[in-house]
Amino acid sequence: MTKSGLPVGDLPEHGAPSVDLALPRTVLAVGAHPDDIEFGCGATLAKWAARGSAVVHAVLTDGSKGTWDPGADLPALIEARKAECRAAASVIDGDRAHPVAERVHFFGYPDGELDTGPAARRALTAVIRDVAPDVVLGHDPWRRYRLHPDHRAAGFLTVDAIVAARDPHFFPDLGRPPHRPGALLLFEPDVPNHVETVTAYAQVKIAALLCHASQQGTTMGILASGDAGSGSTGTARRREIDDFAQRIHRQLASHGGLAGVDAGEAFHLIDAL
Ligand SMILES: [Zn+2]
Protein backbone atom coordinates (compact mmCIF):
# COMPACT_ATOMS: atom_id res chain seq x y z
CA MET A 1 0.00 0.00 0.00
CA THR A 2 1.33 3.44 -0.89
CA LYS A 3 1.40 5.64 2.19
CA SER A 4 2.76 8.95 0.97
CA GLY A 5 5.67 10.46 -0.85
CA LEU A 6 4.34 10.91 -4.40
CA PRO A 7 3.76 14.41 -5.76
CA VAL A 8 0.16 13.47 -6.56
CA GLY A 9 -1.49 11.12 -4.13
CA ASP A 10 -4.04 10.41 -1.50
CA LEU A 11 -4.75 12.51 1.54
CA PRO A 12 -2.86 11.40 4.66
CA GLU A 13 -4.34 8.29 6.16
CA HIS A 14 -5.40 8.08 9.77
CA GLY A 15 -6.71 4.55 9.76
CA ALA A 16 -5.26 1.48 11.43
CA PRO A 17 -1.51 1.16 10.98
CA SER A 18 -0.04 -1.46 8.71
CA VAL A 19 1.89 -4.24 10.46
CA ASP A 20 5.21 -5.88 9.53
CA LEU A 21 7.00 -5.30 6.26
CA ALA A 22 8.16 -8.27 4.22
CA LEU A 23 11.56 -9.41 5.49
CA PRO A 24 14.18 -7.10 3.98
CA ARG A 25 17.43 -8.51 2.65
CA THR A 26 19.48 -5.50 3.72
CA VAL A 27 18.59 -2.60 6.02
CA LEU A 28 20.36 0.65 6.86
CA ALA A 29 19.53 2.42 10.13
CA VAL A 30 20.63 6.05 10.45
CA GLY A 31 20.97 7.68 13.88
CA ALA A 32 22.12 11.10 15.00
CA HIS A 33 23.93 9.79 18.08
CA PRO A 34 25.48 6.47 19.05
CA ASP A 35 22.41 5.17 20.97
CA ASP A 36 19.56 6.57 18.85
CA ILE A 37 19.24 3.55 16.57
CA GLU A 38 18.82 1.15 19.49
CA PHE A 39 16.21 3.41 21.11
CA GLY A 40 14.34 3.99 17.85
CA CYS A 41 14.34 0.59 16.20
CA GLY A 42 16.63 -1.82 18.07
CA ALA A 43 14.01 -4.55 18.46
CA THR A 44 12.95 -4.37 14.82
CA LEU A 45 16.56 -4.67 13.68
CA ALA A 46 17.10 -7.61 16.04
CA LYS A 47 14.03 -9.39 14.64
CA TRP A 48 15.15 -8.92 11.07
CA ALA A 49 18.76 -9.91 11.84
CA ALA A 50 17.54 -13.11 13.52
CA ARG A 51 15.62 -13.95 10.34
CA GLY A 52 18.57 -13.32 8.06
CA SER A 53 18.62 -9.62 7.16
CA ALA A 54 21.95 -7.85 6.90
CA VAL A 55 21.79 -4.86 9.27
CA VAL A 56 24.04 -1.83 8.77
CA HIS A 57 24.21 1.15 11.12
CA ALA A 58 25.11 4.74 10.18
CA VAL A 59 25.96 6.97 13.16
CA LEU A 60 26.19 10.60 12.10
CA THR A 61 27.75 12.42 15.07
CA ASP A 62 30.58 11.55 17.42
CA GLY A 63 28.45 11.75 20.58
CA SER A 64 31.00 14.07 22.16
CA LYS A 65 28.39 16.05 24.12
CA GLY A 66 26.83 12.95 25.65
CA THR A 67 28.08 13.55 29.17
CA TRP A 68 27.13 15.77 32.11
CA ASP A 69 30.77 15.89 33.25
CA PRO A 70 32.25 19.30 32.29
CA GLY A 71 35.77 17.92 32.74
CA ALA A 72 35.27 14.80 30.63
CA ASP A 73 38.06 13.56 28.34
CA LEU A 74 36.16 14.06 25.08
CA PRO A 75 38.50 12.16 22.70
CA ALA A 76 38.25 9.19 25.08
CA LEU A 77 34.46 9.55 25.20
CA ILE A 78 34.27 9.53 21.38
CA GLU A 79 36.31 6.30 21.22
CA ALA A 80 34.27 4.71 24.03
CA ARG A 81 31.03 5.53 22.24
CA LYS A 82 32.32 3.94 19.02
CA ALA A 83 33.13 0.76 20.91
CA GLU A 84 29.68 0.84 22.55
CA CYS A 85 28.06 1.19 19.11
CA ARG A 86 29.95 -1.80 17.77
CA ALA A 87 29.01 -3.86 20.81
CA ALA A 88 25.33 -2.88 20.49
CA ALA A 89 25.33 -3.72 16.77
CA SER A 90 26.84 -7.09 17.59
CA VAL A 91 24.12 -7.78 20.19
CA ILE A 92 21.45 -6.85 17.63
CA ASP A 93 23.06 -9.16 15.09
CA GLY A 94 23.35 -11.99 17.59
CA ASP A 95 26.98 -12.37 16.48
CA ARG A 96 26.00 -13.86 13.17
CA ALA A 97 28.48 -13.86 10.34
CA HIS A 98 27.68 -10.51 8.79
CA PRO A 99 27.44 -10.38 5.00
CA VAL A 100 28.43 -6.71 4.73
CA ALA A 101 31.80 -5.02 4.62
CA GLU A 102 31.11 -2.71 7.53
CA ARG A 103 28.52 -3.15 10.26
CA VAL A 104 28.71 0.42 11.65
CA HIS A 105 29.60 3.49 9.60
CA PHE A 106 30.81 6.39 11.75
CA PHE A 107 30.47 9.81 10.12
CA GLY A 108 32.11 11.64 13.03
CA TYR A 109 30.35 15.00 12.76
CA PRO A 110 30.59 17.02 15.99
CA ASP A 111 27.71 16.27 18.36
CA GLY A 112 25.13 19.07 18.35
CA GLU A 113 26.38 20.59 15.10
CA LEU A 114 24.93 18.25 12.47
CA ASP A 115 23.80 20.12 9.37
CA THR A 116 21.96 19.03 6.26
CA GLY A 117 24.34 20.60 3.77
CA PRO A 118 25.77 19.02 0.63
CA ALA A 119 28.87 17.47 2.27
CA ALA A 120 26.87 15.43 4.79
CA ARG A 121 24.24 14.56 2.20
CA ARG A 122 26.93 13.37 -0.18
CA ALA A 123 28.53 11.19 2.50
CA LEU A 124 25.22 9.53 3.43
CA THR A 125 24.28 9.15 -0.25
CA ALA A 126 27.53 7.24 -0.79
CA VAL A 127 26.68 4.83 2.04
CA ILE A 128 23.12 4.30 0.78
CA ARG A 129 24.44 3.52 -2.71
CA ASP A 130 27.11 1.19 -1.30
CA VAL A 131 24.88 -0.70 1.12
CA ALA A 132 21.89 -0.73 -1.28
CA PRO A 133 19.32 -1.28 1.50
CA ASP A 134 15.77 -2.48 0.87
CA VAL A 135 14.66 -0.54 3.95
CA VAL A 136 16.12 2.62 5.50
CA LEU A 137 15.25 3.60 9.08
CA GLY A 138 15.85 7.04 10.57
CA HIS A 139 14.58 9.89 12.74
CA ASP A 140 11.26 11.50 11.82
CA PRO A 141 12.31 15.06 10.88
CA TRP A 142 8.70 16.23 11.11
CA ARG A 143 8.25 15.22 14.75
CA ARG A 144 6.88 18.30 16.48
CA TYR A 145 8.40 19.98 19.53
CA ARG A 146 11.67 18.09 19.23
CA LEU A 147 14.40 19.93 21.08
CA HIS A 148 17.58 18.28 19.89
CA PRO A 149 18.77 19.85 16.63
CA ASP A 150 20.72 16.72 15.62
CA HIS A 151 17.57 14.58 15.61
CA ARG A 152 15.83 17.01 13.24
CA ALA A 153 18.93 17.34 11.08
CA ALA A 154 19.52 13.57 10.97
CA GLY A 155 15.92 13.04 9.84
CA PHE A 156 16.14 15.59 7.05
CA LEU A 157 19.57 14.31 6.03
CA THR A 158 18.19 10.77 5.75
CA VAL A 159 15.25 11.86 3.61
CA ASP A 160 17.44 14.10 1.44
CA ALA A 161 20.09 11.41 0.96
CA ILE A 162 17.46 8.88 -0.14
CA VAL A 163 16.32 11.31 -2.83
CA ALA A 164 19.93 11.87 -3.90
CA ALA A 165 20.82 8.17 -3.80
CA ARG A 166 17.98 7.17 -6.10
CA ASP A 167 18.45 9.87 -8.76
CA PRO A 168 21.45 9.51 -11.08
CA HIS A 169 22.19 13.22 -11.47
CA PHE A 170 22.98 13.68 -7.77
CA PHE A 171 26.67 13.22 -6.98
CA PRO A 172 27.57 11.36 -10.22
CA ASP A 173 31.23 11.72 -9.20
CA LEU A 174 30.66 9.13 -6.46
CA GLY A 175 31.02 6.52 -9.18
CA ARG A 176 28.35 4.32 -7.63
CA PRO A 177 25.10 3.33 -9.32
CA PRO A 178 21.91 4.97 -8.00
CA HIS A 179 19.90 3.01 -5.48
CA ARG A 180 16.21 3.35 -4.60
CA PRO A 181 15.21 1.71 -1.31
CA GLY A 182 11.78 0.11 -1.13
CA ALA A 183 10.71 1.67 2.16
CA LEU A 184 11.63 4.32 4.71
CA LEU A 185 10.63 3.83 8.34
CA LEU A 186 10.83 6.97 10.49
CA PHE A 187 11.15 6.26 14.19
CA GLU A 188 9.75 8.41 17.02
CA PRO A 189 7.06 9.24 14.47
CA ASP A 190 4.89 12.33 14.66
CA VAL A 191 2.13 10.37 12.94
CA PRO A 192 2.61 6.61 13.36
CA ASN A 193 1.14 4.60 10.49
CA HIS A 194 3.08 1.34 10.76
CA VAL A 195 4.06 -1.09 13.51
CA GLU A 196 6.70 -3.80 13.48
CA THR A 197 5.84 -6.66 15.83
CA VAL A 198 8.79 -7.30 18.13
CA THR A 199 7.51 -9.98 20.49
CA ALA A 200 10.53 -11.82 21.91
CA TYR A 201 12.97 -9.05 20.93
CA ALA A 202 12.52 -6.69 23.89
CA GLN A 203 15.43 -8.27 25.76
CA VAL A 204 17.76 -7.86 22.79
CA LYS A 205 16.81 -4.19 22.52
CA ILE A 206 17.45 -3.68 26.24
CA ALA A 207 20.76 -5.55 26.08
CA ALA A 208 21.86 -3.49 23.06
CA LEU A 209 20.93 -0.25 24.85
CA LEU A 210 22.86 -1.29 27.95
CA CYS A 211 25.97 -1.63 25.75
CA HIS A 212 25.98 2.18 25.75
CA ALA A 213 27.55 2.23 29.20
CA SER A 214 28.61 5.88 28.93
CA GLN A 215 24.95 6.88 28.46
CA GLN A 216 23.35 4.86 31.22
CA GLY A 217 23.21 7.89 33.53
CA THR A 218 22.17 10.49 30.95
CA THR A 219 19.56 8.61 28.91
CA MET A 220 18.58 5.51 30.89
CA GLY A 221 18.33 6.76 34.47
CA ILE A 222 20.92 4.22 35.63
CA LEU A 223 22.99 6.35 37.96
CA ALA A 224 24.42 3.83 40.43
CA SER A 225 27.85 2.82 39.29
CA GLY A 226 29.90 -0.26 39.91
CA ASP A 227 29.50 -3.97 39.72
CA ALA A 228 25.86 -5.06 39.70
CA GLY A 229 26.88 -8.25 41.45
CA SER A 230 27.25 -7.30 45.08
CA GLY A 231 26.74 -4.77 47.87
CA SER A 232 24.27 -1.91 48.23
CA THR A 233 25.56 -0.17 45.08
CA GLY A 234 24.98 -3.38 43.17
CA THR A 235 21.46 -3.61 44.53
CA ALA A 236 20.67 -0.01 43.58
CA ARG A 237 22.14 -0.55 40.13
CA ARG A 238 20.14 -3.72 39.54
CA ARG A 239 16.96 -1.87 40.56
CA GLU A 240 17.71 1.00 38.16
CA ILE A 241 18.46 -1.41 35.31
CA ASP A 242 15.19 -3.19 36.06
CA ASP A 243 13.28 0.12 36.07
CA PHE A 244 14.82 1.01 32.72
CA ALA A 245 13.91 -2.40 31.29
CA GLN A 246 10.32 -1.96 32.50
CA ARG A 247 10.13 1.45 30.76
CA ILE A 248 11.23 -0.19 27.50
CA HIS A 249 8.66 -2.97 27.95
CA ARG A 250 5.93 -0.37 28.56
CA GLN A 251 6.98 1.56 25.46
CA LEU A 252 6.90 -1.56 23.29
CA ALA A 253 3.47 -2.49 24.69
CA SER A 254 2.18 1.01 24.01
CA HIS A 255 3.51 1.06 20.43
CA GLY A 256 2.27 -2.48 19.81
CA GLY A 257 -1.15 -1.48 21.12
CA LEU A 258 -1.60 0.83 18.13
CA ALA A 259 -1.85 -2.30 15.99
CA GLY A 260 -3.28 -4.75 18.51
CA VAL A 261 -0.02 -6.64 19.04
CA ASP A 262 1.59 -7.25 22.42
CA ALA A 263 4.94 -5.60 21.64
CA GLY A 264 5.87 -3.34 18.77
CA GLU A 265 7.92 -0.45 17.49
CA ALA A 266 5.88 2.26 15.75
CA PHE A 267 7.05 4.15 12.69
CA HIS A 268 5.89 6.46 9.95
CA LEU A 269 6.25 4.37 6.82
CA ILE A 270 6.90 5.97 3.47
CA ASP A 271 6.91 3.28 0.81
CA ALA A 272 6.73 5.34 -2.37
CA LEU A 273 10.33 6.35 -2.70
ZN1 LIG B 1 20.14 11.27 20.03
Image (cartoon, rainbow, N blue to C red):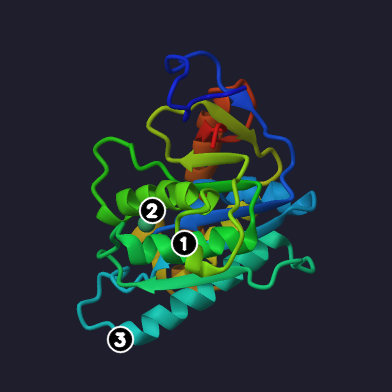
Neighbourhood count class around disc 1 (C-alpha, 10 Å): few under 14, some 14–19, many 20 upward: many
- Amino acid type, callout 3: Asp
Instruction: Note whether 173 is above or below 26 in the view shown.
Output: below
Residue at image x 63%, y 45%?
44
Residue tagged 3 = 73
Which of the two discs, 3 and 1, labels the residue nearer the N terminus? 3
Is 134 left, or right, of 145 in this rendering? right
Residue furthest left in the image: 70
Q: Secondary structure at mark 3?
A: loop
Residue tagged 2 = 157
Residue 181 visible to the viewer = yes
- Foreground residue among 20 and 175: 175
Which of the two discs, 1 and 2, labels the residue nearer the N terminus? 1
Q: CB at mark 2 closer than 8 A to ligand 1?
A: no
- Amino acid type, callout 2: Leu
Q: Position of residue 84 (x, y in %)?
A: 52, 72
Is 124 left, or right, of 183 in this rendering? left
Q: Position of residue 131 (x, y in %)?
A: 63, 61
Q: Secondary structure at mark 1?
A: helix
Q: Quadrant of residue 90?
A: bottom right
Give the CA distance from mark 2 to mark 3. Answer: 29 Å
Residue at image x 58%, y 72%?
86
Residue tagged 1 = 124
Residue 59 visible to the viewer = no
The answer to whether mark 2 and mark 3 are in CB contact below 8 A is no
Which of the two discs, 2 and 3, labels the residue nearer the N terminus? 3
Neighbourhood count class around disc 3 (C-alpha, 10 Å): few under 14, some 14–19, many 20 upward: few
The answer to whether mark 1 and mark 2 are in CB contact below 8 A is yes
Q: Position of residue 216 (x, y in %)?
A: 42, 64
- Foreground residue among 69 and 85: 85
- Foreground residue among 116 and 92: 116
Give the CA distance from mark 1 to mark 2. Answer: 8 Å
